Structure formats: structure tokens, C-alpha cells
Image (cartoon, helix red, strand yellow):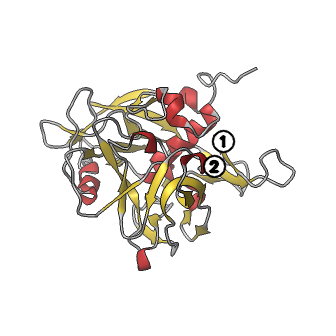
Amino acid sequence: MALDFTKAWPFNKMVEQTVDGQAMVYIPKMYVKNEKLPDTATYAGKYAYLIAPDKIDDTWHVHPAFMNAGKEMSGVQIGKYLASKDSSGKAASIKGATPWTSITRDTAHSLGSNRNVSGGTTEQTGWHMYNIYEHHLIARLMLIEYGSSNLQTLLTGSDSGMDAKYHGIEMVWGGASYGEWFDGIDTLGTNSAVRIFKNDGSQTYVDTGITPCGAGWLKDVLHNKGTNYDLGDVFLAASVDGTQANGSFGDYQWFSGGYVFHSDWGGLAYCGPFYLLNGSASYASSALGFRLARYVE
């Protein structure tokens, strides 16, 4: 009997919520294990991306999407819509609003935290710009729910489809008109090495020393571990191929040194939840925005 994902954890807990007037989608905290399958397994040598509501043993860890300033959160809320500008000049997640674009990634990072207010009856905490851990948490959930990495076809009906929706999150990897910046990932480390947010929720970077592999169809992903990071928690290319049919994920990554990263509005068949396009840290475009997220205590 096929599993009914509408009734299975955590998918049955992914619900739409309104916080401070913003349309958000809640995802409950989960623990993960990135396990290479043994030689006796059907998919020997491949990785299983496991999830659980509780820590099963010390081989499991909380997914970094649920860490804020060294503390485990009970969940995270993801903006249902790309961020727009509200009447007070703050980033918002509102249906039908024009996305806030023509900003650099660093500006988007600052705007992501501007909904936070300290003290009094209007206190708001946990707001931030959507980051690579959150984006690839959603990609992990898609893999599990759909049992395939060909997610663009499964969610849109076409290998060049756009404007995908997942559990209420609109344009979940960008869309036909807009892409979005991803916080927490770049290749601005020493000698253009990969940097990623530390997995303690500090929103500071750790330099992995890993050289990015270049551009192509995503074939294998990195699983390197180090102090304050485990690249098995995201999907960054370890190797790529020039032919789509030789890839394993159906998406393209321009994973080169000296860049920050975003999704794309016009990549068509290149796109999907694992897609990354490189850009300059000072780049801004009228077709490139960002998304709000919020930690839940």
C-alpha cells in the first residue's frame, strides 16, 4: 500500500500560518541522518537522506534549518510568497504583492531581520532571510515525498516547467518571472573555497576549504564534514556532467569560485530545487528577489 503523505509526519504538520500579518508555511523540527548505503543494498553506494521527529541515536543530528543562535527551535516558518515591501518599508509575505527586487544578497540579508522588534506588546523575533539550509530542507522533503529527484516534472508536469508550488510555498525554486537569493552559501572562502553558514544558527560562515567543481548537470553531491558543518545537509555539487541525462538530480548548478548564489527566473529546464546560479556579491536585478523565514521557539 502506498504511503498517504497527507497523513504522514512531517508533511501533515506543514500548515499555512499567519504571523504579524505575513503568510507563512510552518515546518516542524526534525533530525536527520545522511547515510551511505552498504554494498548489500539495492542502491549500494548511494545516500539515504533520512528524517525523524526525535534524535534516534548519536548518528543523527538536528537539521541546521532549526538552529538559531545555538538553540534548537521547535520549527521554522517559510514565506509563502517571495518578499515584497509593505507600507512601513519592511519585507513582507503577502499574496499578489510585487516582489522586492533590484537588491544585493547582503541587502536582502539585512531586510530579512527588519521585522524583528524588541520588547513590549509588539515584540517580534526569529525573522530572517531564507537560507540554503531551509531551501535544501525543502528539497530533502520533496525527495522523500515524491521518491524522485526529477521534481520539476513531478511538480509542474514539464521538464521546463516553472512556478512550482509545494505545501503552499509559491515559486518554491523561483518562477517564470523571478528568481531569489539564497543566504548562507557562497564560494568566497580562501582561494574561492565553499563557505556555508555554521550549523549552530549563528548566521556566520565557516570556510570549508573545498574547491567548487564548476558548472554542469548535478551528478554527485558533497558530503564533507568539519567543525560546524556537514555538507550532507545540503545539495552542493561534488561533480557535474555536460549532458543532462548523465546527471542524477535533473538540475543544473553553476558552482564556481568567487560567487554568491541564487535561483533563476529564466533557466527553464535547468531549474528545480537543486539549481544554483552564481552571481557577484554586488549583483542586483529587477528579476531577482528573496524570501522571508522565521524561527519558531
Q: Give x and y (percent) for residue 45.
A: 76, 55
Can you identify the residue that label 1 sits on? 52
For mark 2, does the 10 Å Cα neighbourhood hold few (<14), some (14 to 19), or many (20 or more) residues? many
Q: Give x and y (percent) for residue 219.
A: 59, 54
Q: Are marks 1 and 2 in contact (CB under 8 Å)?
A: yes
Question: Marks 1 and 2, how far apart in space?
Answer: 6 Å
Residue kind at label 2, given as amino acid type: Val
Q: Identify the secondary structure beneath mark 1.
A: strand
Q: Give x and y (percent) for residue 93.
A: 28, 35
Q: Give x and y (percent) for residue 116.
A: 27, 47
The mark nearer the N terminus, 1 or 2, is 2
- Res. 297 visible in picture: no
Residue 121 sits in quarter: top left
Taking the spot 27% from the left edge, 27% from the top edge, the residue there is: 95
Left/right of residue 10 with respect to residue 293 in the rendered view = right
Left/right of residue 171 with respect to residue 27 in the rendered view = left
Residue kind at label 1, given as amino acid type: Ala
- The residue lying toward the viewer, choosing from 94 and 19, is 94
Residue 255 sits in quarter: bottom left
Residue 198 drawn above or below residue 142: below
Taking the spot 84% from the left edge, 55% from the top edge, the residue there is: 39
Left/right of residue 232 with respect to residue 262 in the rendered view = right
Can you identify the residue that label 2 sits on? 32
Q: Quadrant of the N terminus?
A: top right
- The residue lying toward the viewer, choosing from 46 and 168, is 46
Q: Identify the secondary structure beneath mark 2.
A: strand
Q: Residue furthest right?
A: 40
- Res. 214 visible in picture: yes
